[in-house]
Image (cartoon, rainbow, N blue to C red):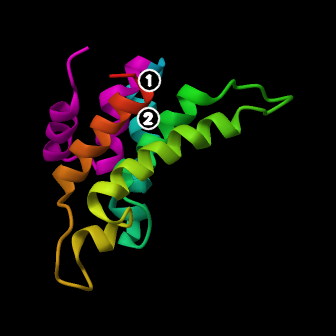
């Protein structure tokens, strides 16, 4: 599969938030509806709408990790560890490159030193989705 990272960045430039850009780029590969994923992730952009939380592109990548790792067994939810392993690999890969996963730190709001601009955060999260979840 050809990388879709630039497609995710283009969705962001079109007005999608960072979380929406990630999930809408890959939702078809996880059997999910684009409109529903768009709506579900609307409040996750800008570090959970406050810049205080985890980067929305990473939160979205963890949602995709849940779609990949979960068995969906409502009676015996036993697949959390697998999903956590996938999510941790994404977060660790991003943190290794950027020194943080927190939106306001990535944007340098307090330090005035930007670690990673939004389009680059989205691009990197997309590449990690492809590497960790899609085996590319």
Residue, x 22% and y 76% (percent of image)? 108
For label 2, the SS is helix
Q: Position of residue 17 (x, y in %)?
A: 28, 50
What residue range appears in magenta?
Answer: 1-29
Residue 48 figure quarter: bottom left
* Left or right: residue 8 compared with residue 31: left
Q: Quadrant of the C terminus?
A: top left
Q: Quadrant of the N terminus?
A: top left
Q: CA distance from mark 1 to mark 2?
A: 6 Å
Most foreground residue, 22 or 131: 131
Q: Position of residue 3 (x, y in %)?
A: 21, 24
Which residue has dot 1 on it? 33
Residue 115 higher or lower than 76, as above or below:
below
Residue, x 59% and y 29% (percent of image)? 69
Residue 34 higher or lower than 62, as above or below:
above
Question: Does the magenta segment cover residue 21?
Answer: yes
Taking the view exactly as shown, the residue that stands out farthest to the top is 1
Residue 47, label in figure: none
Which residue has dot 2 on it? 37
* Left or right: residue 29 compared with residue 81: left
């Amino acid at each position: 599969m050809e990388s879709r990272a630039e497609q995710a960045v283009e969705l962001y430039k079109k007005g999608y938030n960072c979380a929406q850009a990630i999930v809408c780029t890959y939702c078809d590969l996880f059997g999910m509806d684009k409109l529903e994923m768009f709506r579900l992730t609307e409040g996750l952009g800008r570090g959970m709408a406050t810049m205080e939380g985890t980067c929305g592109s990473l939160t979205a990548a963890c949602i995709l990790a849940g779609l990949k790792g979960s068995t969906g067994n409502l009676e015996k939810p036993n697949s959390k560890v697998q999903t956590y392993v996938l999510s941790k690999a994404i977060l660790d890969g991003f943190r290794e490159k950027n020194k943080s996963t927190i939106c306001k730190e990535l944007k340098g709001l307090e330090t005035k030193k930007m670690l990673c601009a939004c389009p680059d955060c989205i691009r990197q999260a997309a590449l990690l989705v492809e590497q960790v979840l899609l085996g590319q």
